[in-house]
Amino acid sequence: MNARLTMAACALLASGPLFAQSTLDAVKSKGYVQCGVNTGLAGFSQPDSRGAWKGIDVDACRAIAAAVFGDASKVRYTPLTAQQRFTALQSGEVDVLSRNTTWTITRDTSLGLNFVGTNYYDGQGFMVPKKLGVKSAKQLNGATVCVQPGTTTELNLADYFRANRMTFKPVVIEKLEEITSAYFAGRCDVFTTDVSGLVSTRSSRAPNPADHVILPEVISKEPLGPVVRHGDDRWFDVVKWSLFAMLEAEELGLSSKNIDQQASSTNPAVQRFVGATGDIGKMLGVDNRWAYNIIKQVGNYGESFEANLTPLGFDRGINNLWTKGGLMYAPPVR
């Protein structure tokens, strides 16, 4: 009897996901997307003086809401530290993690997560006070380095110094605000993180940005992008194609300013994109005007970049479209 009960329980557990509510259905039911974001990184995700969240990672969340609800404002934000982010996603506390997170094989497999794509190609670098006169990371032997725990940054730092037969003294602090305060207060000689984070931090937090230098070495590949849980392909598709829609729109020349005018274009690619022909939205489980709603309310990728990153001194570089020498490329929306 006990054996039979055990076998029945196992069967129910095994079949559980088949009957579990999908993330898309759960999101539609509650009426908003719960999005995990950084606790505050200018250009990526940070609340403004009115408490409104801004940044390219925030725009990714807004794009999902526009696709699902036709309303980009139907998002709630959960600020997460580097150490909190994966647990929050795995546990269901958030529906999607859009928090300058590096795509790695470990995270894509053993953590039970799926990266939907890359919304910013990055690499790790080093920032030092200009007064130190350091010109290269190879001159950092014996330096005290501020670094956040639970990040690829921490691992890359150790690898780089070991490979170059140098030593360093880590100052490990979890919260971004606290670690940048420690660096600017002189508690460490060096602050290391993704170059995007260094540019953002220098521009938005340094008392005098000109007093700090980002060294030329980029020591890693850090493709950053939104993340969802394993095992829910429909939600994975919606989040993935919301990102791709912003890239495709830029390539097609569609923006928040001209999409109404361009919607009447005879270009078949534009007609499919805005939902005038085909049933792409239905394939995703959303309205056929899903991509139109994203661009009308959020804008294309270039608009998001220009609004959030360009003012901080970011250059498009490898984050330009593939047609302009960059790496940004969306599969065909057809």
Image (tube, rainbow, N blue to C red):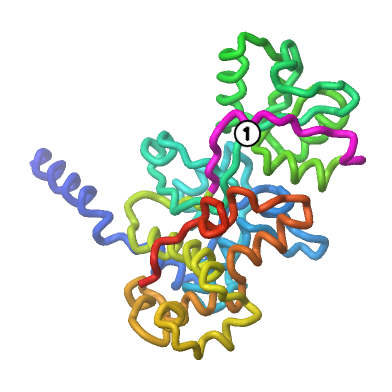
The residue positioned 71% from the left and 29% from the top of the image is 126
Task: Report the amino acid beneath label 1.
Answer: Gln
* Quadrant of the image occupied by residue 143: top right
* In this rendering, position of residue 129 left or right of residue 231: right
* In this rendering, position of residue 139 left or right of residue 276: right
Foreground pick, 246 / 112: 246
* Quadrant of the image occupied by residue 178: top right
Residue 133: percent from left, percent from top: 86, 22
* Quadrant of the image occupied by residue 217: top right
The residue positioned 31% from the left and 60% from the top of the image is 20
Q: Looking at the picture, does residue 153 appear above or below residue 85?
A: above
* In this rendering, position of residue 195 left or right of residue 94: right
Q: How many labels does the image show?
A: 1
Dot 1 falls on a residue whose secondary structure is strand
Residue 106: percent from left, percent from top: 42, 34
| Residue assigned mark 1 | 124
Q: How many residues crowd around disc 1 within 10 Å: few (fewer than 14), some, or many (20 or more)?
A: many
The residue positioned 78% from the left and 35% from the top of the image is 180
Residue 283 shows in this picture: yes
Q: Which range of residues does the magenta coloring cover?
A: 207-224
